[in-house]
C-alpha cells in the first residue's frame, strides 16, 4: 500500500471515529442484544473481529468510539453463548431477514456507471463485466460499482413489493416489519415476530421460493387449458393475472418473440391488443386467442411470474447465522449510514439525501475517476484525474469507493 | 417400569408387541397390526422407541418413525374435523376450522404458514410448495386429508426426536433383541446407506450444475459462496483429496491458500465440528440460482450426488471394455 493510500485510510477512519464520538448515544443496539453475536470490520488490517458479545449498550457504544470500525454487524440469530465458536454458540432462533440489492436486479440504467478492468490486459469498460475481455479473452475482472438513482429506485420498488407480500400474504403486521436503507445499493427488511424465529433453513427456503417465484406450477394456480386466474384474485393467482396483463399490454413484438412465441401468435397478440385488454373485464384472455396453445401460455405465464417476483438475495434469507449491518452505523464503502425508514415513508425516502451522515466541513481531493452523482442537495462530477474541494459527505463517498485520495482538509464550510 | 424389569415374564407380551411393531416397519414400511389389549398396545410404543434408539442406526430410526407416522395419518383419515383439530392443538399448531367459501372451495382448515412450511417443506410433490398454495393473511388453506398428511410429518419428526435419545446399558437379552432387529434390517435393505457414493472421479458423470461450477472455477471466474460450497462438498464426497480441491481454487484472483485450506478441510470434516458436509439438494440449488437447468437424468433425482451415482452406472456400461 502506498503512503497516500495509508494516509487516506487514516483520514477516513478519523472521520468515522468523529461520527461515532458524536452520535454513538443515538445508536440503538438490536433487540435481545445479549444473545447476539457482534462483528466489526477493522479499518487498518481489513480483518473481521467476530464473536463479540455485549450485555449492555454502554460497553457496545464505547467500543464503537474507541475502535471506530469501518463496518458494524450483528447476527440475525440469537444464541445462548454468542461469544463461542459457531458450533458451540447454541442457536436459539433467528429473525427473518431480506436483503434487496441493486446487484440482484436488472435495472434500466444497465449499470452504465459501473466500470470493470481486465485483470490481464487492463482493458476497461462500463456496465456489468462481460464473459470474456473483448481485447484479450481473459475472464477475470476488477469491478467498481456505484449506487445510482435508477438502481436505488429499482431497489425501492422491490422493497415495496416485498412489504406488500409480507403483510398481505404472510400476515405480518406492519409494526413487525422493519425497513432500512443499507447504506450502499439497497434495502434490508427485518421481521422479528416470535412465530418465525425457530424456522430452519428448509422452511425459510419455502418463503424465499414464494418471493422469487421458484417452483411455481401454473396448473396448481388455476392456469389450465382455456382458463386462468383473474386480476382480483389473491396471492400468486392474482400476480399471474397481473403479470400477464402487464406483459401482454406492454410487450413489443420483439419482446414477445424473445420468449419464443411464433410469429403468427405475436401478430395476433399485437393486432388484438384492445380485445385482450377488454377480456380482463370478463374471464381474461386465456381462451380468446386462436393459435396460442398451452406451450405459448406457459411461456407468457413464466414471463408474468418473472415480472411479479420479488428480487431478493436468496442466500441472505435462508442463512440462519447471517451477520447484518446495524442501523445508524456507517457503511465502509460509502460513508453513508444505514438508515431506518418507517413504512409510511418508504415511497418518499431519498437515500442519497436522508442517509448522509456528515453534514459539515469540506475536503480537498484528487479524484481518479467518478461518474456524476447526487448527494444531499448537490450534484457532483463526473470527474476524471481532477483536484476538487468537496463537502465532507461527498468527499468521503469517493474516498470510501477508492476513487480519490486526500489532498488536505479545509476548515471553512 | 424400570429397564431391568423388562426381562420379567409379565412384561413379555409388551416387549414382543414392541418388537413386532419394529419388524413390520422394517419389512413393510408400515404398521398395520394392533394388539387387542390396550395395556399391551399403549406401553409397547415407548418400548419400541427405546429398542430403535438402541440400534443407534439413523436409517432404522428413519424407517421406524416414518412407519409409525403413516399409521397415525391413516387413522386420522377416518376421523372427523374436531379430532384432527384436537391433535393439531397438541402440537401447538395454529389451526382454524373454516366453512367452505367460494374463494377457498372444499377447504376445511386454515393453518398458519409457519406450521405449514415446517411440515410441508420436506414433502416432494409440487402441490406442497408454499408458492402453489393459497396464502392469505399468514394462513394456508387445506382440506382435511391434507391436514392429516401434514400431521403425519409432525408425528414423524416428533418420533425421530424421541429416537435421538441415547440409550444406556441394556440387559443382555434386550441387547440380543436389538441386534436381531438390526440384522433383520440389514438383510432387508443392505448395509450401505444411500448417501454412499462411488469414490471415483469420473467427470462425464458430473451433473450439469457441477459441470457448470467446475467450468466457471477452472476459468478463474467468480463463484458465489453457495456455488463454492456446492462444488467443494460434491468433490470431497466423490473422493477428491483436499489438496486437489484447493488446487482448483488457485485459478481465482482472490485465492488465499490459508483461508481456502481452512474451509475445504472444514467441509471435508477434518476440522472443528468434524461434520462431513454434503452438497445442497437440487431444489435448494434452484432457489439460489445455481441450477443451470435440468437434463433428463436430473428429472429422476433430487440430489447432485444421487445424479452422480446413477450416471456412473450409465457411464460405466458405456465404457469400452479394457483389453
Image (cartoon, coloured by chain):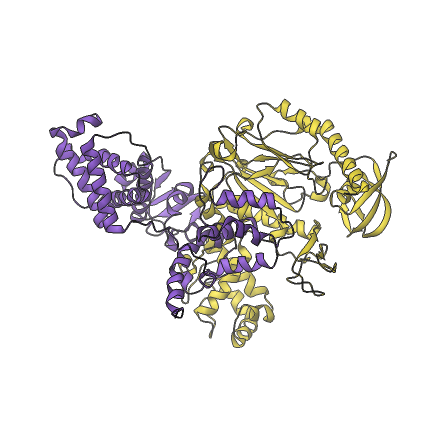
Chain colours: A yellow, B purple
The residue drawn where x is 18% and y is 46% is B32
Residue A113 higher or lower than A341, as above or below: below
Q: Is residue A356 left or right of residue A51?
A: right
Q: Position of residue B105 (x, y in %)?
A: 35, 52
List the single residue furthest toward the bottom. Answer: A264
Residue A98 higher or lower than A260, as above or below: above
Q: Nearer the viewer, residue B251 or A294?
A: B251
The residue drawn where x is 54% and y is 31% is A36
Q: Is residue A55 left or right of residue B236?
A: right
Q: Position of residue A165 (x, y in %)?
A: 51, 47
Q: Is residue B280 left or right of residue A271?
A: left
Q: Is residue A276 visible?
A: yes
Say how many tags the image has: 0
Q: Nearer the viewer, residue A162 or B211?
A: B211
* Image quadrant in which the N terminus of chain B is located: top left
Q: Nearer the viewer, residue A274 or A154?
A: A154
Q: Position of residue A37 (x, y in %)?
A: 56, 32
* Image quadrant in which the C terminus of chain B is located: bottom left
The residue drawn where x is 51% and y is 35% is A86
Q: Is residue B303 visible?
A: no
Q: Is residue B181 left or right of residue A262?
A: left
Residue A18, quarter of picture: top right
List the single residue furthest toward the front. Answer: B323
Residue A74, quarter of picture: top right
Amino acid at each position: 500500500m502506498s503512503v497516500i493510500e495509508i494516509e487516506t485510510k487514516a483520514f477516513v477512519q478519523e472521520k468515522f471515529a468523529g461520527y461515532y464520538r458524536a452520535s454513538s448515544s443515538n445508536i440503538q443496539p438490536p433487540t435481545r442484544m445479549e444473545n447476539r453475536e457482534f462483528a466489526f470490520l477493522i479499518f487498518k488490517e481489513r480483518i473481521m473481529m467476530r464473536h463479540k458479545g455485549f450485555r449492555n449498550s454502554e460497553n457496545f457504544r464505547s467500543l464503537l468510539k474507541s475502535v471506530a470500525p469501518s463496518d458494524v454487524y450483528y447476527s440475525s440469530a440469537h444464541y445462548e453463548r454468542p461469544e463461542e465458536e459457531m458450533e458451540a454458540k447454541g442457536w436459539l432462533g433467528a429473525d427473518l431477514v431480506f436483503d434487496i440489492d441493486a446487484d440482484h436486479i436488472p435495472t434500466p440504467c444497465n449499470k452504465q456507471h459501473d466500470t470493470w478492468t481486465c485483470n490481464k490486459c487492463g482493458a476497461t469498460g462500463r456496465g456489468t463485466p462481460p464473459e470474456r475481455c473483448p481485447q484479450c479473452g481473459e475472464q477475470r475482472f476488477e469491478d467498481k460499482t456505484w449506487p445510482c438513482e435508477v438502481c436505488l429506485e429499482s431497489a425501492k420498488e422491490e422493497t415495496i413489493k416485498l412489504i406488500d407480500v409480507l403483510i398481505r400474504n404472510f400476515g405480518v403486521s406492519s409494526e413487525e416489519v422493519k425497513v432500512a436503507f443499507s447504506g450502499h445499493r439497497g434495502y434490508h427488511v427485518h421481521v422479528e415476530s416470535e412465530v418465525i424465529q425457530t424456522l430452519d433453513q428448509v422452511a425459510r427456503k419455502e418463503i424465499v421460493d414464494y418471493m422469487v417465484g421458484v417452483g411455481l406450477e401454473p396448473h396448481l394456480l388455476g392456469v389450465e387449458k382455456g382458463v386462468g386466474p383473474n386480476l382480483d384474485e389473491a396471492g400468486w393467482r392474482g400476480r399471474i393475472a397481473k403479470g400477464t396483463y402487464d406483459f401482454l399490454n406492454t410487450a413489443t413484438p420483439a419482446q414477445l418473440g424473445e420468449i419464443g412465441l411464433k410469429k403468427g401468435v405475436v401478430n395476433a397478440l399485437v393486432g388484438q391488443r384492445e380485445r385482450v385488454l377488454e377480456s380482463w373485464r370478463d374471464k381474461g384472455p386465456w381462451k380468446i386467442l386462436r393459435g396460442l396453445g398451452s406451450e405459448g401460455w406457459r411461456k407468457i405465464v413464466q414471463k408474468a411470474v418473472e415480472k411479479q417476483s420479488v428480487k431478493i438475495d436468496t442466500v441472505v434469507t435462508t442463512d440462519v447465522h447471517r451477520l447484518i449491518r446495524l442501523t445508524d452505523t456507517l457503511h465502509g464503502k460509502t460513508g453513508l449510514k444505514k438508515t431506518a425508514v418507517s413504512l409510511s415513508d418508504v415511497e418518499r425516502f431519498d437515500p442519497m439525501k436522508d442517509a448522509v451522515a456528515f453534514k459539515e466541513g469540506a475536503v480537498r481531493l484528487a479524484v481518479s475517476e467518478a461518474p456524476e452523482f447526487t448527494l444531499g442537495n448537490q450534484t457532483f462530477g463526473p470527474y476524471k484525474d481532477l483536484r476538487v474541494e468537496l463537502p465532507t459527505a461527498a468527499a468521503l463517498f469517493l474516498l470510501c469507493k477508492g476513487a480519490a485520495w486526500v489532498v488536505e482538509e479545509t476548515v471553512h464550510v | 417400569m424400570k429397564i431391568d424389569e423388562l426381562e420379567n415374564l409379565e412384561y413379555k407380551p409388551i416387549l414382543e408387541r414392541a418388537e413386532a411393531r419394529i419388524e413390520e416397519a422394517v419389512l413393510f414400511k408400515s404398521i398395520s397390526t394392533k394388539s387387542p389389549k390396550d395395556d399391551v398396545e399403549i406401553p409397547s410404543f415407548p418400548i419400541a422407541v427405546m429398542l430403535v434408539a438402541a440400534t443407534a442406526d439413523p436409517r432404522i430410526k428413519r424407517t421406524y418413525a416414518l412407519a409409525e407416522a403413516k399409521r397415525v395419518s391413516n387413522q386420522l383419515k377416518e376421523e372427523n374435523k374436531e379430532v384432527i383439530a384436537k391433535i393439531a392443538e397438541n402440537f401447538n399448531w395454529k389451526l382454524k376450522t373454516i366453512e367452505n367459501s367460494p374463494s377457498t372451495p372444499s377447504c376445511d382448515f386454515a393453518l398458519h404458514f409457519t406450521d405449514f412450511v415446517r411440515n410441508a417443506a420436506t414433502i416432494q410433490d409440487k402441490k406442497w410448495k408454499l408458492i402453489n398454495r393459497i396464502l392469505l393473511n399468514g394462513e394456508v388453506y387445506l382440506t382435511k386429508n391434507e391436514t392429516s398428511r401434514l400431521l403425519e410429518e409432525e408425528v414423524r419428526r416428533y418420533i425421530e426426536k424421541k429416537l435421538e435419545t441415547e440409550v444406556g446399558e441394556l440387559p443382555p437379552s434386550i441387547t440380543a433383541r436389538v441386534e436381531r432387529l438390526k440384522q433383520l434390517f440389514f438383510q432387508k435393505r443392505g448395509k450401505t446407506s444411500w448417501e454412499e457414493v462411488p469414490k471415483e472421479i469420473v467427470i462425464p458423470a458430473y451433473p450439469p450444475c457441477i459441470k457448470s461450477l467446475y467450468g466457471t472455477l477452472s476459468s478463474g471466474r467468480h463463484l458465489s459462496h453457495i456455488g463454492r460450497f456446492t462444488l467443494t462438498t460434491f468433490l470431497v464426497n466423490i473422493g477428491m483429496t483436499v489438496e486437489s480441491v484447493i488446487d482448483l481454487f488457485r485459478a481465482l484472483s482472490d485465492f488465499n491458500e490459508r483461508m481456502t485450506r481452512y474451509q475445504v478441510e472444514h467441509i471435508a470434516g477434518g476440522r472443528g465440528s468434524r461434520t462431513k458436509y454434503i452438497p445442497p439438494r437440487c431444489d435448494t440449488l434452484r432457489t439460489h440460482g445455481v441450477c443451470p437447468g435440468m437434463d433428463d437424468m436430473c428429472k429422476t433425482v433430487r440430489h447432485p450426488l444421487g445424479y452422480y451415482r446413477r450416471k456412473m452406472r450409465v457411464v460405466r456400461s458405456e465404457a469400452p471394455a479394457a483389453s
